[in-house]
Image: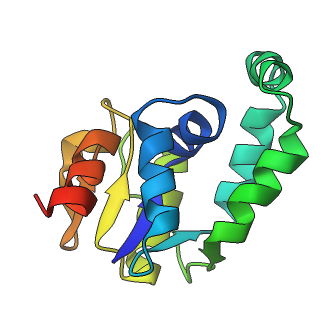
Amino acid sequence: MHIVLDTNVVLSALLWCGTPHHLLALIRQRGDVQLYASPALLEELADVLSRPFAAQRLARIDKTSHEVLADYARVVELIEPATVPRIVVGDIDDDQVIAIAVAARADLVVSGDRKHLLPLGRHQGIRIVDAAQAFNLLLYGK
């Protein structure tokens, strides 16, 4: 299975212990799941990790932004989409997520963006789900 995680899910997975964290742990355990990202998504994650709220959380968990970014980068396969078409009305950053998913021939995009990405439901046959749905799909097949 090929999966692209939106930056909001990655951030939650790396800094907190909720469903996105459990989803990332499950993905790491499974040998049949590959995560995909792009340099643009890693840059976005690095930017978000440098913000004050993230710095406070990183201090609480005794990690640096470089550590968590490097940890995540080790588990993803980086790809560069050939094009990034305008798909998502209202959030150009989400176009990056869709473009990577198409380039990776992803089965799932996992996002917490209830305003822009999740309402799409699908794009070119790629399901767009939240972290809980992705976790259930991986664990139970539904």
Q: Position of residue 30 (x, y in %)?
A: 42, 72
Q: What residue is at 28 percent from the left and 52 percent from the top?
A: 134
Number of numbered labels in the structure image:
0
Q: Position of residue 45 (x, y in %)?
A: 70, 46
- 90 or 36: which is nearer to us? 36
What is the basis of the colouring in this image?
rainbow
Position of 39 with respect to 117 (left or right) is right
Q: Position of residue 12 (x, y in %)?
A: 55, 34
Q: Is residue 20 placed above or below 137 in the rendered structure?
A: above
Q: What residue is at 21 percent from the left and 40 percent from the top?
A: 119
Q: Which image quadrant: the N terminus?
A: bottom left
Q: Which image quadrant: the C terminus?
A: bottom left
Q: Is residue 99 placed above or below 10 in the rendered structure?
A: below
State the image quarter where residue 48 is shown. top right
Q: Position of residue 74 (x, y in %)?
A: 72, 69
Position of 43 with respect to 94 (left or right) is right
- 123 or 48: which is nearer to us? 48
Q: Is residue 139 placed above or below 126 in the rendered structure?
A: above
Residue 59 visible, this angle: yes
State the image quarter where residue 71 is shown. bottom right
The residue lying furthest to the left in this view is 142
Q: Is residue 57 placed above or below 20 in the rendered structure?
A: above
Position of 7 with respect to 142 (left or right) is right
Residue 85 visible, this angle: no
Q: What residue is at 69 percent from the left and 58 percent from the top?
A: 72
Position of 138 with respect to 99 (left or right) is left
Q: What residue is at 43 percent from the left and 57 percent from the top?
A: 26
